[in-house]
Image (cartoon, helix red, strand yellow):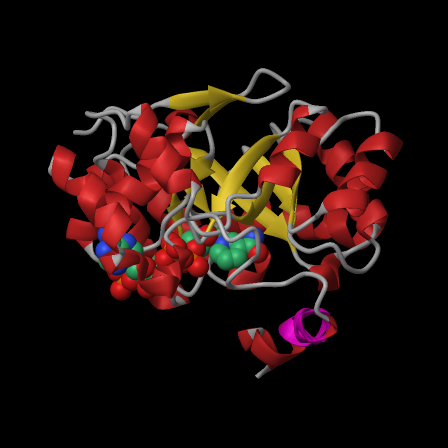
Amino acid sequence: MIKMQYITLNNGVKMPLVGFGVYQIKANECEKAVKEAINVGYRLIDTAQAYYNEEGVGSAVVNSGVPRDKLFITTKVWISNAGDDKALKSIDESLRKLKTDYIDLLLIHQPFGDYYGTYRAMLKAYKQGKVRAIGLSNFYDARFIDLCENMEIKPAVVQLETHVFTQQRKMTELMAQYKTKLMAWSPLAEGKNNLFTDKTLKAIGSKYGKTNAQIALKFLAQKSIVSIPKTVHKERMIENLDIFDFNLDKEDLKRLDALDTGKPLAADFTDPKLAKFLLDYDKTFNPANS
Ligand SMILES: NC(=O)c1ccc[n+]([C@@H]2O[C@H](COP(=O)([O-])OP(=O)(O)OC[C@H]3O[C@@H](n4cnc5c(N)ncnc54)[C@H](OP(=O)(O)O)[C@@H]3O)[C@@H](O)[C@H]2O)c1
């Protein structure tokens, strides 16, 4: 089995450097996929209230045969649960669905609604021992700074769209001020920009006998950025984890740095249409509403 590497968060909690993301894995397929991922060596699972598959993650964790304290579960509070009381209730609901008495990392999923209330609720849960670390997702620039400056406990992690084409250099600098770690969502850019056939990645991969996906993920790992690639295929689960037996050299890193477009490919958080889509998301996609 592949030996995992870890980073240490600003409150001392250790977090695996590569995890398994379960967005868009259907509720009835999630347990199988997560069990398979744990079996091949993943120790970090990234889910969210709005993925509607926390129960599958919980069942896989309970039935995996791996002790709970060797696993690291991340989930996220959705916008429809924003605010002090609602968020606190939703954290208990996530704990119930995940069949655990603590969440390793809890994030505010989107910078919309009463996210100040949500952060206060997460702090409460943190102090009660229900959560080991708290953080944010999709918070950028001034909004990130505002929350950090106003809260006694700084976010341990911010999860952002991050991959070779969107490297988040500005946010990395801002986050360093608070010792906040970057966690990459869509670390393979969901295959956009032809990531899986990109010539630069391919040329570098041929030096080490590695695939484009492995080079893209190693690039993040070597910068201590946590990544959470998603796949429902066992051979790809193994491939995406098998990145700890080589190192990219300075020249490789320079060539990969140059792939940065400085812009998001998947989600532009300054776009009002995206805000509207996310604000309506739970109404549109929550299976409990259909
Ligand atoms: N916080 C947020 O707002 C947010 C937003 C998006 C995602 N996320 C998190 O980030 C995780 C990953 O993001 P993502 O699923 O959007 O994108 P991703 O991991 O960059 O890419 C997933 C896609 O790549 C394919 N794939 C995976 N490994 C491959 C490989 N080795 N070779 C070829 N194809 C491969 C998968 O297909 P198959 O499954 O068919 O193999 C899937 O279509 C999510 O599951 C979720 O946990 C968070």
Image height of 99 relative to 114, above or below: above
As drawn, the residue found furthest toward the bottom would be 290
Which percent across, then down, holds residue 42? Answer: 31, 37
The region drawn magenta spans 273-281
Q: Residue at x 88, y 33 (%)?
A: 150
Seen in the image, is 226 located left or right of residue 243?
right
Q: Nearer the viewer, residue 3 or 99?
A: 3
Give the side of residue 149 with respect to residue 201, left or right: right
- Residue 100 coordinates in the image, percent (x, y): 50, 39
| Residue with the most extreme right position | 150
> Residue at 30% across / 33% down in the picture?
252
Name the image quarter holding residue 122: top right
Q: List x then y, in percent, for residue 178.
A: 71, 24
Which quadrant does ligand 1 occupy?
Answer: bottom left
Residue 242 appears in the figure:
yes
In this rendering, the answer to whether 68 lies above or below 192 is above
Q: Nearer the viewer, residue 241 or 250?
A: 250
Indicate the quadrant containing the C terminus: top left, top right, bottom left or bottom right. Answer: bottom right
Q: Is residue 275 covered in magenta?
A: yes
Q: Residue at x 70, y 30 (%)?
A: 126
Report the front residue among 201 and 23.
201
Magenta portion: prevailing SS class: helix
Q: Can residue 18 be seen at all in this image of the molecule?
A: no
- At x 72%, y 69%, the residue is 275
Figure quadrant of the N terminus: top left
Asked if the magenta segment contains residue 286, the reply would be no
Asked if residue 15 is positioned above or below residue 287 in the image, the reply reads above
Q: Residue furthest top?
A: 12
Quadrant location of residue 156? top right
